[in-house]
Image (spheres, helix red, strand yellow):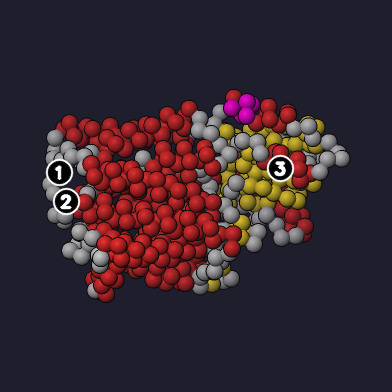
Amino acid sequence: MIIRKKYLFYVLAITSSFIAAAVTGLDSYVGGRPAFINDPWAFAFSLFFVGAIITLCITLLLSVPIHGKSIGAKILDPSFKRIRMIKKPELSYHLIAGVMNAINTVGYCYVVSVVQDPAVILSFSQMVILYLLIMESITEKDVPTLVEVQSSVIVTFGAILASISLKGELATNPLIVVFLIINPTWAIFSIYQRKLKIMKIQNKPNDSINIRFWNVVFSCVFTALILFVFDSCTSGGHLIAGVTAVISLEYFLLLGATMGITFFAYVLYIRSLGMGKASVNNAIRASTIFFAIPFSILLWQLGFITEYSTDPVMLIIKVIGIILIVMGIISFALTVVKAYIFVTVKTGRPLRETMQKLWNIRGVTHVTITTGEYDFVVKVSTRTLMKGYERIIKKLDEIDEVKKYRWASVLKDWEKI
Amino acid sequence: MQPGKSDKAIKEMRQIENVAKISIIAGEYDIVIRAQVKNLEELLDVTDKLQMIEGVNKTTTQIIEKEISLQ
């Protein structure tokens, strides 16, 4: 089936957000259980320990072929064939993503055990978009435009307002952990997951199911290592507490449920990361806050969160926060200009060198050498047409090898899923 | 493309096997289609089916020899 690429991207990101909201609700419940309420370290280790087992089972199940195609390829990611060992070029990215996810999860476990309202926790984490924008401008061939900065600021302020609990409290310690630990590590984790997703493995696109499986394995190993060092230095027993907790069937099932659901949220998230910029993806994922509200109400109904205030001022602040987040997301989504440039080059110049020069132009997303009427088909993506002229056409004119080119703006596109 | 027949033609193009991406563009051409095929025989199938669609006046094929991509 071929659907509009933009819609597929949104469907993946929003579905992932919905599942993430459900998981945060469940995590809040598990994090508040007696074994974990005062020990986020043990909670994080137990999550990954059970997560590695559950993820292995799910990945093996998804590897079962039906009519020549694996179940995973049919229902989750067409690039997936079967569970496989990681390749050498992937290793360094997996190591970094694993360390970041391990640190991030310990921080997250601390926050869920202190702040039980999922809507508040998720609102905090939306501010990760600012870190991503800064890091993308450093690591990728891109510089944020005014629109991106504006949208990020709108989303961030919206998230701050929406994160004030209906009781009118703004917890400071968890907020510091979110800013200094959770958000930076999540930003780096996202960038490396994206790098893994856009990597080609034996000339085929990498698949999000194996990426997630190996990430959980590495995160589990790193969490165990961190806890081991921490326990040795402080004579603590967090690692043992984590292992002991999962022996209980009740905890194993609860942790298995949360990590099983998380698996699907992450696979969809990683897939959408391969389709759009990490910062835009995270902006869309800001919609998690909306989805978290019903789960917050559910937890409140179950008596797990203390009673909400019905103070109209607090409700208005919350609504303004949510509206700002939506505005930010919409302005992100509506401001991308894509185009094809058909390039003919002068003879007697090496094509590979010209290809590299074209690739070095900021905003270029694909360069293909082709046979036929043109020598190159270059695909570009920019926030505005003016920027397209300033950053792309001017640079193209400077390349001596280019004989002539034709610019063709994309008006609408579809992609196979 | 023949004017006025794009919408119906695109619907038919979306049904063709091995078509990975369709972009409507402004400029010399009207539509760019990316196809992923295993051999030239399959490419012939794609171009053949495209040319059978009502409203398609002319097709030009570019074969990718090498590609660098962010996605």
* First in sequence: mark 2 vs mark 3: 2
Residue indicated by mark 1:
A308
Gap between marks 1 and 2 measured at Cα: 8 Å
Gap between marks 2 and 3 measured at Cα: 57 Å
Magenta stretch in the rendered image:
A387-391
Outermost residue to the right: A348
* Label 3 chain ID: A
- Say whether marks 2 and 3 touch (CB < 8 Å): no
- Say whether marks 1 and 2 touch (CB < 8 Å): yes
* First in sequence: mark 1 vs mark 3: 1
* Label 2 chain ID: A
**A167 to the left or right of A329:** left
* Label 1 chain ID: A
Residue A287 visible from this viewpoint: no
Q: Amino acid at mark 3?
A: Gln
- Say whether marks 1 and 3 touch (CB < 8 Å): no
